[in-house]
Amino acid sequence: MTLYILISDPISDDGINTLLETEDVIVDKKIDLSKKELLNCIGKYDALLVRSQTEVDRELIAAGKNLKAIGRAGVGVDNVDLNAATEHGVVVVNAPMGNTISTAEHTMAMLMAASRKIPQSYESLTKNEWNRKAYVGVELYQKTLGIIGFGRIGNEVSKRAKGFQMNVIAYDPFLTEEKAEKLGITCGSIDDVLKQADFITIHTPLLKETKHLINQTAFEKMKKGVYILNCARGGLVDEEALYHAITTGKVAGAALDVFENEPVINHELLNLPEVIATPHLGASTFEAQENVAVDVSFDVLEMLRGKPAKNPVNMPSVSYEVIQKLEPYYTLAEKIGSFLSQIAKGAIREIAIEYSGELKEINTDLLNRITVKGMLKKHLGHQINDVNAFHLAEQKEIVINEKKTTLNKGFTNLMTITVKTNEEMRSISGTRIEGLGIEFVNVDDYRVDVVPTSHMIFIRHYDKPGMIGKVGSFLGECDINIATMQVGRKEPGGEAIMLLSVDKHLKHDFIDDLKHVANIIDVTPIEL
Ligand code: NAD
Ligand code: MLT
């Protein structure tokens, strides 16, 4: 099947070679499409690749009837409506690593340019002025750099600033004193950073909580003569408050790579001589653009081939090692879920997933999603996938519970799924046996050893002599070949179950007839 990929922002040609060289992939590069043009063409595509220009909103995602993946060649996904993508089952992947160094270097370039007034003095020189007095700068040596947001970029900026023998104080909710000590920096509160720093650089994402993090109140806490840098996102710094802080002399200079509304035209901050700026160039190096394009192309292709992505944004991010451990259980999870949905009567209220053995030790979020998908796809069909499984379950008010337990019942790994409906509770345990594959080992507390296959029949009956023969002959008369048959009972003569693997689907008329065979309680054909 041919896969269609649309690239709607300028993305490095070298970086998308994997896509261009893949036989069954057609890549269309259509830059600068209007919103209307995008809406008109998106329906054809399996994946969309963007940088930060294309506004991937709810309307566009909804119009992307075939859309399975959105790749953001960069870090920030603020131009993608993640909730809408999740609701429509579209995976969003980004490329968080590829432009870290470029952005950190850009931040350092801005720090030096601002402290030595390089853009201003160059501009003056181009006007044939030789004004050495107006452009006296300040040294970075032994000054304090305050870093707000100590993630990938914040960290790299800190290393470079230390090379200039600056003192670094950083605030990040995840930065610990131990880590700071190891890095030779100080870990402080946001107020410590605001109060102590000579230069403040911000490297957080733009979130509800971080919007205007640097506002009037924050400026009031800062030292007089402080410099402000923003190479992260417009909107982190309140631009009006910054204008006021500069014109009142609190802030000596500002270096901005990003703005609240981009592209910027006639911005009042750009009229101030204390402000230097670049048009969102943090990640604009050949290296970074190639890196992010390579990363995002790889992930989008993996997603379209049904494999887990390395950098999913609206899915749990798990390491390659964990994915390798989980992969063999994907089928087990989906088949248990699907089997249960076919035998459980009533509306599903709760799905409880219990792991023991080696599964106890790893992040099983992906297996939970696959289980829920397996269970709900009977009613939701292809609209449910690993991305929107929890969302759709939540919409249907289904509670999902996960439990890790040491009770492995003698298996090296065990996955038990229990479904509670408004009528009953059913459960299946399954395991994976190295070299043999997956097996159901318990169905509703009956001990079995059953390999799930495409066509199965689940029979509840009373444990009476001759039941196996009766069912065998009945199916023989229906021209249905039995591949395997397993019975399970709790006590002689009581209720029992029979699980058969058959070569073809059992027709409805036959099911009704089989139900009328003496001592049979119920018959459910299962398609997996
Ligand atoms: P990251 O996720 O590695 O780091 C962000 C850090 O911010 C995290 O450690 C997080 O804990 C911290 N944080 C979140 N809320 C905070 C708060 N209220 N106070 C303090 N810290 C907070 O991300 P990154 O790769 O370092 O990117 C940082 C920013 O740079 C993002 O906004 C990204 O979009 C932007 N970026 C811009 C460019 C550019 O071209 N200018 C290029 C790349 C990245
Ligand atoms: C990012 O978040 O990665 C940047 O803003 C870079 C970009 O889109 O060019």
Image: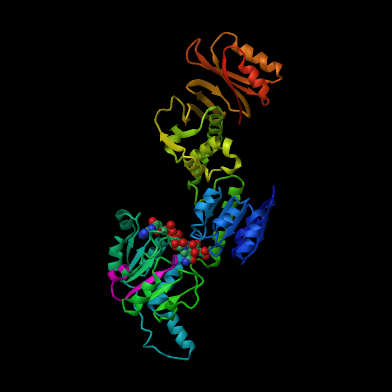
- Asked if residue 26 lies left or right of residue 54, the reply is right
Residue 7 is one of the magenta-drawn residues? no
> Which is more toward the observer, 168 or 486?
486
Up the image or down, 90 lies above or below 340; here it is below
Give how far across and how far down residue 307 sits, in percent: 57, 45
Q: Is residue 165 visible?
A: no
Give how far across and how far down residue 152 sits, in percent: 43, 59
Q: Residue lying farthest top? A: 465
Residue at x-position 67% and y-position 15%: 474
Residue at x-position 34% and y-position 78%: 138
Q: Quadrant of ligand 1?
A: bottom left
> Which is more toward the observer, 437 or 490?
490
- Asked if residue 333 lies left or right of residue 251, the reply is right
> Which is more toward the observer, 173 or 394?
394
Residue at x-position 40% and y-position 61%: 204
Give how far across and how far down residue 36 sits, in percent: 62, 63
Up the image or down, 500 lies above or below 200; here it is above
If the image is split into quadrants, where does the C terminus sit? top right
- Asked if residue 117 lies left or right of residue 388, the reply is left
Q: Is residue 80 visible?
A: yes
Q: Which residues are magenta?
A: 217-234
| Quadrant housing residue 230 | bottom left
| Scheme of colours in the image | rainbow
Give how far across and how far down residue 328 sits, in percent: 54, 36
Number of callouts = 0
> Which is more toward the observer, 292 or 222?
222
